[in-house]
Amino acid sequence: MKENVLDVLTYMFESYFYEEEADNMFNRETLLEELVEVGFDHQDVEKAFNWLADLPTSQEDLRLTSPEQSSVRIFDTWESKKLDLHCRGYLSELEQMGILNAASRELIIDRVMALETDEISIEQLRWVCLIVLYNLSGSDIPYSWLEDIVMDLSSSHIH
C-alpha cells in the first residue's frame, strides 16, 4: 500500500498529467482501477480525485477571490504547524520571484491544508506547488520549465 493522498497525486501527476495524450485517456473509473492495481487505497484515490476537483482551472477563476497584491500573509497556528518555517520561506521565495501571486499562494496553502497530514515536508510542498501551477497554467507553460523552477529551486537559501 502507498502512504497517502499526496502520494496518489504525485503518482498521477508523474504518470499521466503532463503526457500529451493525458486528456484523451483520463477516465475516472479506468484511472481508479489502475491506481488501485499499483497499490493505492481506493479511498485515498477518491480523496485525490476530490482534491483535484477543488482546483480552479484558470487564473481568471483565481482572480475572483484574489487578495490584494500588497497584502501580508500571516499564518494561523494550524497552518504554521503544517507548514514549518522552511515551507513558509519557500512559498515566500516563490512569491518574491514572481512565480506565485497572492492568489496562487493562497490556493497552494488551501490545497496543503486539505491534505490529511499533520505536517508537510518541503518536498511534498514542492509537489503541491507543481500540481497547482501546472493546473493553473492550462498546460500553456511547458511542464519541464515548471518542474525546473519549482522542484530545483535551491531551498538551502530560504529563511
Image (spheres, rainbow, N blue to C red):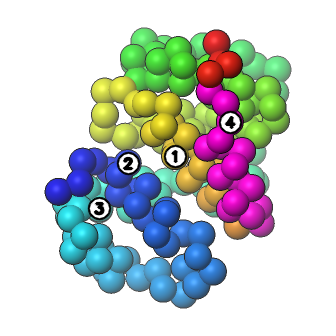
**Is residue 125 shown left or right of residue 147?**
left
**Which element is circle 1 on?**
helix
Q: Amino acid at mark 2?
A: Leu
Sequence-earlier tag: 3 or 1:
3
Sequence-earlier tag: 1 or 2:
2
Sequence-earlier tag: 2 or 4:
2
The image shows residue 72 at horizontal and vertical percentages of 71, 15
Give the distance between the C-alpha atoms of the residues marked 3 and 2, in whole angstroms: 10 Å
Give the distance between the C-alpha atoms of the residues marked 3 and 1, in whole angstroms: 17 Å
**Which element is circle 3 on?**
helix
Q: Nearer the viewer, mark 3 or mark 2?
A: 2
The image shows residue 48 at horizontal and vertical percentages of 36, 57
- Dividing the image into 4 quarters, which one contains the C terminus? top right
The image shows residue 100 at horizontal and vertical percentages of 73, 37
Residue picked out by circle 4: 153
Residue picked out by circle 3: 45
Residue picked out by circle 1: 127
- Nearest the camera: 129 or 79? 129
